[in-house]
Amino acid sequence: MNSADNRIRKIAIVGGGSTGWIAAAVLANQFKRELVEITLVESEEIGTIGVGESTIPPFVGLLRGLGIDERDFIRETQASFKLGISFEDWHSKGEKYFHPFGVIGQRLGIHEFYQAWLWARQNGDDTPLQDYAPCSVMAREGKFFLPQKAQKTPIGGGAYALHLDAKLAGRYLRKYAEARGVQRVEGIVSEVESRTDGFIERLRLKDGREVEADFFIDCTGFRALLIEKHLGVGFEDWKQYLPCDRAVTVQTENTGDTTPFTRAAAEDAGWRWRIPLQHRTGNGYVYDSRFISDEDARARLLEAVDGKPLTDPMVIPFRTGIRDELWKNNCLSLGLASGFIEPLESTAIHLVTRGVDFFLRFFPGKDCDPALAAEYNRRMRLDHEEIRDFIVLHYCLTARDDTDFWRWWQDAEIPQTLRERIALFEGHGVLREGVDELFHSPSWYSVFEGMGVRPRASDPRIENMPLATIRQAMESGRTAIAEMVATLPSHDEFLKEHCPAVSLK
């Protein structure tokens, strides 16, 4: 147990936005203000990127863990619900597939549903895999209902996330954190001072004020003010795996139904997202600057969006990769300061909350035992590599060769860990799952099937079950989902009844 004089009493977070205020909110929820003093330094002069507006189900878990009223959060952040992602033109032009949250089918005795579906498919059944996923069917029909309110029903295995306004979410979490004692300091850091052992001792602001702390959290985005500029921690570039290096974004008016899913449409030099909120729609084009100019990418995005633009298009350069050490000495980096993986599966906010969660699991004393930092860095690297491999999976299986960008992917370097996963699945339909991973079997099954990869053989044990029994169970499950979804309210109806957005001032 830490001695009293070794306990961390002061934490300084540098940088606000959704990253900084998520960290502040979680820490304030875990520590009474009398035990740990938390200060967040940010400046209105330094803008935030504010485009991380699509989340995944663990974010809903974060809100619940903080004791935040979900309906209130949705109203205040103009949020909508997300059941998954629709991928268009990724395998071939004109094709699309859906990656749902939650389950796909139900186990048949000892057998995984996917193996039963595969065996039926090999014997003439042509029902699409996603007909057995509650979230896919709800998304296809534009319907929504809370799965946790429908336990023991055909949609009870579903899950959901949120589309939200990142700046409004940051504002909401700031209010939450400040109400629990977090002190916000308006100012720009001009100097960082360390002790002789390399530990950061204090921040000096432009106006001469000083902020001292026992531990510092770098949420300064791509600037990486503490972890890179001061401590000199390097960055491992993953451009050889994920070559897209820029995004252009624009917000537009809503033009109709608020779809309960994110749209990811493949483009000639990357891909384009559409994220519908209650008050507007977020749009972006992620691209490889070797194959398209900023001007052409901007023009293509404006040509493709629905609705009148509400903002000027903004170009955001980025590097995909991970910091060599996310935690060094008494400094932890979060968000863009720690690494970046393009937002195809909306994992940015998840990695922030994951980072704070692991920090709490390995919470140090003032001496910051290097063993804790080493284990934190190991675990977070595994998370980043898992997500990296899953994103690469969407690209490397493409059959497209109609542009230079997609031809590049025909011979692209693929991480060895992903090569092994693909080979295992292609041969036997077996998935390699690590400990505490983000993406579980329904996610991998969905992308593999959507990208045209189907195992050569199914689990031979499935043949012990009569094919007629399998078909009957599958048809019963599919019909039950379809019939229940038909009775549900539309996504817009559900939002209007349960959590309509507040009017913006």
Image: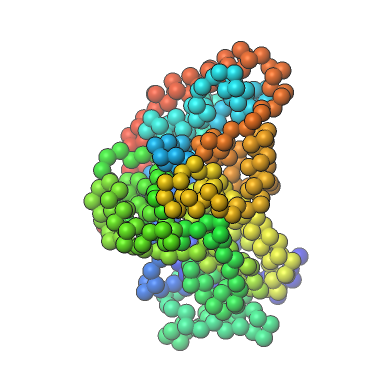
Drawn side of residue 248 relative to residue 69, left or right? left
Residue toward you, 254 or 205: 254
Q: Is residue 138 above or below residue 268?
A: above
Residue at image point 48% right, 68% down? 222
Residue at image point 69% right, 19% down? 463
Q: Residue furthest left?
A: 308
Residue 24, horizontal then vertical, whole percent: 51, 63
Residue 271, horizontal then vertical, whole percent: 41, 50
Q: Based on the displayed image, in which of its 4 quarters is residue 81 positioned?
A: top left
Q: Is residue 488 above or below residue 241?
A: above
Residue at image point 43% right, 31% down? 138
Residue 158, horizontal then vertical, whole percent: 51, 34
Q: Is residue 245 visible?
A: yes
- Image quadrant holding the N terminus, namely bottom right
- Image quadrant holding the C terminus, namely bottom left
Q: Is residue 151 visible?
A: no
Residue toward you, 323 or 377: 323
